[in-house]
Every structure is written in C-alpha cells, then in structure tokens.
Image (tube, rainbow, N blue to C red):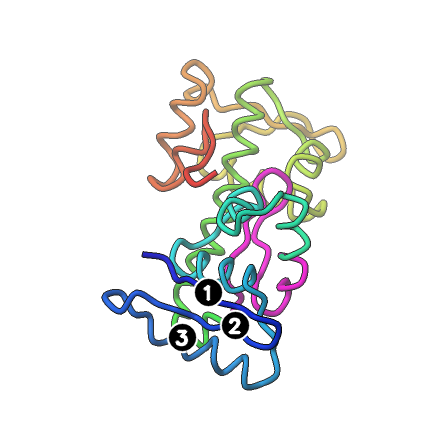
C-alpha cells in the first residue's frame, strides 16, 4: 500500500503501511522537515514513488501524483538538483532520487545502478533510429537524446565497440550503419543484445509509462 498524506495549512502528516514500513525513508522525510523543508503533498508522493519504483518519466510521475504533465514538470523542477536528479535526455529522460538522498537512505549503490540504466536507455534509442532509417550520425544523436558532441561520439563508439554499429566515412562526414548481423532482423536483434531490463525499450515503450 502506498503512503497517504493528510495536510492542512500548517502541516503535512505522513501515514505509512506498517506492514511495509520504510524507516530510512520516514527518517529522511522528518529530517528534511526539521531542517526547514516545507514538504508539499505532491512532493512527498513523487519522492515516495521514486523510492519504491526507481527512475520514472514525467508522464509516469504525473500519474503518480494525479497531476497534468505540465504540473508534474513544475513539481520536478522544484525538486531537481536537490531531491531529484535527471537521468538521460530527450525521449529517454528519467527522474530519480539524487545522490544526496540515496546517500541519506543508505542506498548509494542504487544511485550508481540507476545512472547506468539511463545510459543504456539512450543507447537503445540511438539503435532504434539506426535500425529504422539505416544510418545515424553525431548530429542526429544530439537531436535524439539532447547530448553534447562528445557525449554523442561516446554513445556511437560504445555501440560500435559492441558490434551493433559500423562506421562509414571519417571525421565530419562520418556516419554509422547497423552492423550486418543486426540489420536483417532489425529491432529484435538489437533488443537481444541489450540488458534484459531494457529490451522493452526497443520496439515499445518502457514499463511504467
């Protein structure tokens, strides 16, 4: 059972299911309040959702707090850089609890793992495009996942090193095509070479969206 909240003009009271009591999270919420944070109900709902479910898109958080996506984005912006971090970019953008929060919860390893999954989500988006259109270049990668030139280069080189892409041309004229063994079977072959928890991002939306 997810947590429930009772709020008035001065206070917000958190109610947790005793059978699944998350003591580290409860202590974190109280410590933040004592330090001066005035929690909004929606902030608690979003933070609790990310604690229980891991990284989520804006659309998923909007459903979790029963708000529009525009309202959810405003909520995220209020938490960003302190309670929440942004992982990935463009269509692959996900939000998760920040390093500071995960540290306070004793879950440092979770933060590192979630960052790794975000990078794999970007790579899967790049491969989807390459398989569908037969080629991809640095500029297209930057537009797809909103990264810098250097980050786009690293994404492409990583996929090339995995045997998924083959470089054609050099320097400013360079572009990449799906490797021969990926091209005939398209998305299924790409998905087979990605981690199990990301295979659903190729050819379909991730769970939770």
Residue at the far front: name it: 8
Q: Nearer the viewer, residue 193 or 3?
A: 3
Look at the image and give the residue range highlighted in magenta: 76-100
Among the 4 quarters of the image, the one containing residue 84: bottom right
Compared with residue 122, is residue 86 higher up or lower down, i.e. above or below? below
Residue lying at 60% horizontally and 38% vertically, measured from the top left? 91
| Residue 91: in magenta span | yes
Instruction: Check disc 1 and report its element: helix, strand or loop.
Output: strand
Q: Which residue position is annotated with label 3?
A: 26
Residue lying at 37% horizontally and 57% vertically, measured from the top left? 2
Compared with residue 30, is residue 77 higher up or lower down, i.e. above or below? above
Compared with residue 177, is residue 121 higher up or lower down, i.e. above or below? below
**Residue 12 - label:** 2
Instruction: Check disc 2 and report its element: helix, strand or loop.
Output: strand
Residue at the far bottom: name it: 34
Residue at the far right: name it: 172
Q: Nearer the viewer, mark 3 or mark 2?
A: 2
Q: Nearer the viewer, residue 143 or 29?
A: 29
- Quarter of the image with the N terminus is bottom left
Dot 1 and dot 2 residues touching (CB under 8 Å): yes
Residue at the far top: name it: 184
| Residue 48: in magenta span | no
Q: Position of residue 63 (x, y in %)?
A: 51, 44
* Alpha-carbon span between mark 3 and mark 1: 13 Å
**Residue 5 - label:** 1
Q: Nearer the viewer, mark 3 or mark 1?
A: 1
Q: Position of residue 138 (x, y in %)?
A: 69, 35
Residue lying at 54% horizontally and 63% vertically, measured from the top left? 41
Residue 129 lies left or right of residue 162; in this view the side is right
Closer to the chain start, of discs 1 and 2, is 1
């Amino acid at each position: 059972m997810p947590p429930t909240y009772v709020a008035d003009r001065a206070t917000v009271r958190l109610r947790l299911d005793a059978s699944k009591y998350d003591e580290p999270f409860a202590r974190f919420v109280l410590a933040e309040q004592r330090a001066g944070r005035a929690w909004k109900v929606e902030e608690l709902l979003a933070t609790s959702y990310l604690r229980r479910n891991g990284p989520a898109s804006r659309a998923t958080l909007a459903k979790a707090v029963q708000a529009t996506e525009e309202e959810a984005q405003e909520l995220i912006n209020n938490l960003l850089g302190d309670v929440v971090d942004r992982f990935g970019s463009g269509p692959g953008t996900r939000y998760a609890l920040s390093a500071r929060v995960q540290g306070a919860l004793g879950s440092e390893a979770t933060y590192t793992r979630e960052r790794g999954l975000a990078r794999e989500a970007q790579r899967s988006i790049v491969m989807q495009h390459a398989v569908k259109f037969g080629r991809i270049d640095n500029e297209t990668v930057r537009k797809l996942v909103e990264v810098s030139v250097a980050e786009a280069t690293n994404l492409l080189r990583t996929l090339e090193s995995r045997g998924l892409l083959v470089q054609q041309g050099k320097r400013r004229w360079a572009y990449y095509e799906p490797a021969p063994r990926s091209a005939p079977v398209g998305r299924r072959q790409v998905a087979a070479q990605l981690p199990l928890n990301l295979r659903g991002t190729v050819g379909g939306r991730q769970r939770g969206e």
